[in-house]
Amino acid sequence: MVAGAVIGATIADLHNQRREVVEGGRTVYTEPDRIIVRDPGGQAYVRGNDLYRFRYGARDIRTDTVGGETRTVVIRPDGSEVITVVGPDGSLLRRIRRDPGGREIMIIDNSYRDPRAVGGFYVDVPPPVVSIPYDRYIVDAQEAPPEVIYETMRAPPVQRIDRRYSLDEIRYSPNVRMQMPSIDVNTINFATGSWTIPPDQAARLQVIADGINQALQANPQEVFLIEGHTDAVGNEVDNLSLSDRRAQAAAELLTQQFGVPAENLTSQGYGEQYLKEQTQGPSLINRRVTVRRITPLLNGGQANAAPPPRQ
């Protein structure tokens, strides 16, 4: 196993496990560990279950359902707990970390809906006005020195954030996400159709992990979105699934090899929607993952204070 994926596994291996149904005008493609939905307007998105990432190194796992909500508690060897609450449809509602002394820190509250939120999870806002240099807004992990990567992991939004956004709004609204600088992790080279991170490339995530862990030392409530991308080869459904698995593989590796707490990471695949190189052919540049700090979007731009020291 490498980063949670069978070595040599490709998207073609999943075709015989995928099921397709039409529900209320939507086409839903179900795989063993995620779903892809195409709505009547033609927009498509993927949604996975990231609880798998919390099982690594767990001492015990408990799950119970109350009032339609399913609560999963992962107990770690040190006695701390990560509590994940999902709704009846499997969507994340809350993620909480409880230390051995019983003190709780809210990491993600996806149940919050801003009074100005309208309709679904897509937020129609203008693209942000970016006044910082391009290479500090979209940082190239292959070219940037470590200190720039570390600074980007704690960089503020490029413009004022005027409200809180739910995690789903951030995931599915590009102009919301783009208010935060990002790091293109183009040091990892994915083979066509594969989400496996080659073992000889895993060490290239060290500088990313160091930057995230430094940010978490200053604020344990920080949340980072790992975004997966593909090139334009292949169909839309395959590419959404593949990109989501690439993001998953990077998130798992950051936790398992570099000690980044799983609860401070979330992942999402975008398929071929955001090509870096505008080509319909194979492109190593487009087969990538991106890391973005999203804490200010989740809390409306207000700095999350670190919890007070234990007495």
Image: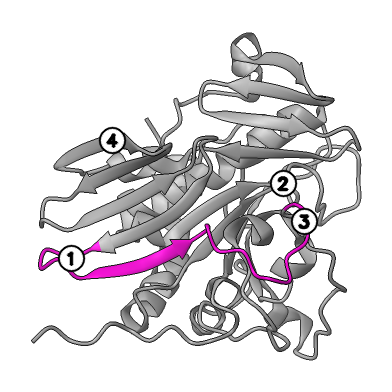
Can you tell which of label 2 and label 1 is closer to the viewer?
1
Q: Earlier in the sequence, mark 2 or mark 4?
A: 4
Q: Which of marks 3 and 2 is nearer the N terminus?
A: 3
Which residue in the structure is indicated by mark 3? 122
Classed neighbour count for the residue bearing mark 3: other residues with Cα under 10 Å, few (<14), some (14–19), many (≥20): some
Label 2 SS: loop
Residue 203, x across and y down, in percent: 41, 55
Q: Please name the predominant secondary structure of the magenta segment in the image.
A: loop
Q: Which of marks 1 and 3 is nearer the N terminus?
A: 1
Which label sits on residue 64? 4
Does residue 61 appear to the left or right of 158 in the view shown?
left
Residue 257, x across and y down, in percent: 32, 52
Residue in view at x 68 percent, y 83 percent = 161
Does residue 36 appear to the left or right of 219 in the view shown?
right
Three-letter code, disc 4: Asp
In the image, is residue 298 above or below residue 2? below
**Front one among 73 and 44:** 73
Can you tell which of label 3 and label 2 is closer to the viewer?
3
Q: Quadrant of the C terminus?
A: bottom left
